[in-house]
Image (cartoon, rainbow, N blue to C red):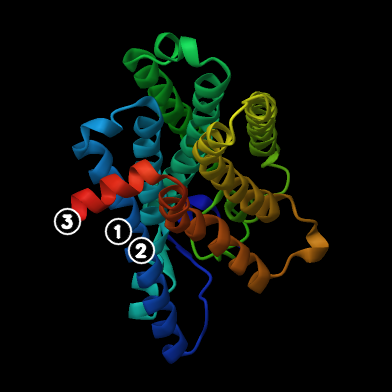
Amino acid sequence: MSNSSSITQFLLLPFTDTQELQLLHFWLFLGIYLAALLGNGLIITTIACDQHLHTPMYFFLLNLSLLDLGCISTTVPKSMANSLWDTRAISYSGCAAQLFSFAFMTAAEYSLLTVMSYDRYVAICKPLHYGTLLGSRACVHMAAAAWATGFLNALLHTANTFSLPLCKGNVLDQFFCEIPQILKLSCSHSCLREIRLIAISFSVVFVCFVFIMVSYVQILRAVLRIPSEQGRHKAFSTCLPHLAVVSLFVSTGMFAYLKPPSMSSPSQDLVVSVLYSLVPPAVNPLIYSMRNQELKDALCKLIS
C-alpha cells in the first residue's frame, strides 16, 4: 500500500520478459515510428511547399498530420527505450506529461476530424458558399478551436487524475500512462469525480460522432444527385479517405474503452492499445495519399 505523495515512479507493462523478444519489440516499434514520421512528414512538407494545396481541406490535413506525429511520439519512444534498456520505469512527472500529451493529441485529433467532416459537407452540399463559410480566417479559427479543445480536455483530466490519492501501488497494466490505468491505482471512493468527467467527455465525443454521421448522410444524398459518374467519383474520392480515418480512429478507440470486462485481459488490452495508439498515426498518411490524386502528384513532384 502506498499513497501518491510517496510514489516517485510508475512501472509500465512490458511486452515480454525475454531479452530477444524485447529487442524484436524495439525494432517493430521503430519501424512503425519511422513509417509514421516519414508519411506524416512528407504530407506536411508537401502541403507547406505546394501552393496548389493551400486550400481548407489540405490545411486541416496538415494539422491532422501534426497531431498524428505528436500522438505517436508521446508513447512510442519511451516504450522503445524501456525495451532497449530492459526497464519498466517511468517517472511520476514523466507519466503525468505522457498522459497529458496523449489526451491532448487524441482529443484535438477527434475535434479536427469533426471539423474536417464539416469542410467536406460544405464543399459538396454548399459549393457556392464554400469560399464564404471556409475562408482562411474561419479555417484558422476552427483549427485553433480543435487544438484548444484538446488542450482543455487534457488539462482537466490530468489535473483531476493526479490529484487523486493513489493507494494501490504503482504498477500500470499498460505500456504507457493513460487515465483508466491510473484510476485503477486510486482509492475506490475517490475516483468518482474523474469518472464523472470521463462521462462528460464521452458525451461530447458522442455529439461529435453524431455530427460526423449526419454530415455524411447529407453528403451521400448530395453525391447521389450528381448526374455525371465522373463527378460522383471525384466527390467520393475526397470523402472516402476522411471517412476511413474517422472509422479507424473511432472503432479502435471504442473497442479499447467500451469493450465488456469479460473480454478484457492484460495481453488483449496490450494488443488493443497498440491498435488505437500506433496504427492510426502510421496508416492515416497512406489512406489519404492512396485516394487523392492531387496529393500524389504533389508528392511525386516534391520527391523528384
Q: Secondary structure at mark 3?
A: loop
In the rendered image, the vertical position of residue 148 relative to residue 62, given as above or below = above
Looking at marks 2 and 3 on the same chain, the residue that comes earlier in the sequence is marked by: 2
In the rendered image, the vertical position of residue 106 relative to residue 174, given as above or below = above
Cα–Cα span, label 2 and label 3: 20 Å
Cα–Cα span, label 1 and label 2: 5 Å
The quarter in which the C terminus is drawn is bottom left
How packed mark 2 is, by other alpha carbons closer than 10 Å (few <14, some 14-19, many 20 or more), is: some
136 relative to 6 in the view: left or right: left
Q: Residue at x 51, y 41 (%)?
A: 237
Question: What type is the residue that disc 3 sits on?
Answer: Ser
- Contact (Cβ within 8 Å) of mark 2 with mark 3: no
Looking at marks 1 and 3 on the same chain, the residue that comes earlier in the sequence is marked by: 1
Q: Secondary structure at mark 1?
A: helix
Q: Residue at x 57, y 47 (%)?
A: 244
The quarter in which the N terminus is drawn is bottom right
Residue at the extreme right: 262
Q: Which residue is mark 2?
A: 35
Q: Which residue is mark 1?
A: 38
Q: Residue at x 55, y 29 (%)?
A: 117
Question: What type is the residue that disc 2 sits on?
Answer: Ala
Cα–Cα span, label 1 and label 3: 16 Å
Nearer the observer: mark 1 or 3; the answer is 3
- Contact (Cβ within 8 Å) of mark 1 with mark 2: yes
Query: Within the image, what quadrant is residue 32 found in?
Result: bottom left
Residue 304 marker: 3
Residue 285 marker: none
